[in-house]
Amino acid sequence: MTWGTLMSRAHGMCEFCGGMDDCLPVEVEGAGEMLVCAVCDSDPPVEHWRCLEAASRSDVPEVQVAVWRKLGAIETPWAAEIRSRMTLLPEAQALV
């Protein structure tokens, strides 16, 4: 995916949290690329990841796969609850 296409799809914002600072493309293993800000690409406090509730409703398969995987790695009840409510697109479901 080209930089312009990725920026357009993401509206120039992090596809995890909506942040606009220092966004760069990140490879979602086996799925493609998504735009992620410097905060999400670092090691933020676990509470930062509550942003994944909004991201879990994305209609972009790459983002759905990344959110699913990230929520699975967070060992808190709220992360499990968000993950259990996700409705994955068939393209994303095949990759998780």
Image: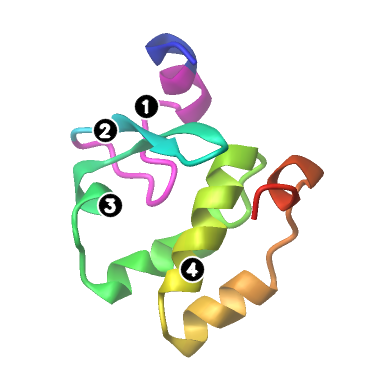
Residue 53 placement (x, y as % from top left): 52, 64
Q: From the image, tell me which residue sits under label 3.
A: 40
Query: 14 or 88, which is in the foreground?
Result: 88
Determine the CA span between mark 3 and mark 4.
13 Å
| Mark 2 vs 1: CB contact within 8 A | yes
Residue 12 placement (x, y as % from top left): 37, 27
Going from N to C along the chain, the mark reached first, 2 or 1, is 1
Classify 10 Å Cα crowding around label 4: few (below 14), some (14-19), many (20 and above): many
User: Amino acid type of disc 3?
Assistant: Cys
| Mark 3 vs 1: CB contact within 8 A | no
Residue at the extreme bottom: 77
Secondary element at image label 3? helix
- The verdict on residue 10 being magenta is yes
| Mark 2 vs 4: CB contact within 8 A | no
Determine the CA span between mark 2 and mark 3.
9 Å
Q: From the image, tell me which residue sits under label 1.
A: 12
Going from N to C along the chain, the mark reached first, 3 or 4, is 3
Going from N to C along the chain, the mark reached first, 2 or 4, is 2
- Select label 2 or label 1 by which is in front: 2
Secondary element at image label 1? loop
Residue found at x 48% / y 41%: 29
Classify 10 Å Cα crowding around label 3: few (below 14), some (14-19), many (20 and above): some
Residue at the extreme right: 90
- Select label 4 or label 1 by which is in front: 4
- Select label 2 or label 4 by which is in front: 4
User: Amino acid type of disc 2?
Assistant: Cys
Determine the CA span between mark 2 and mark 4.
21 Å
| Label drawn at residue 52 | none
Magenta range = 6-21
Secondary element at image label 4? helix
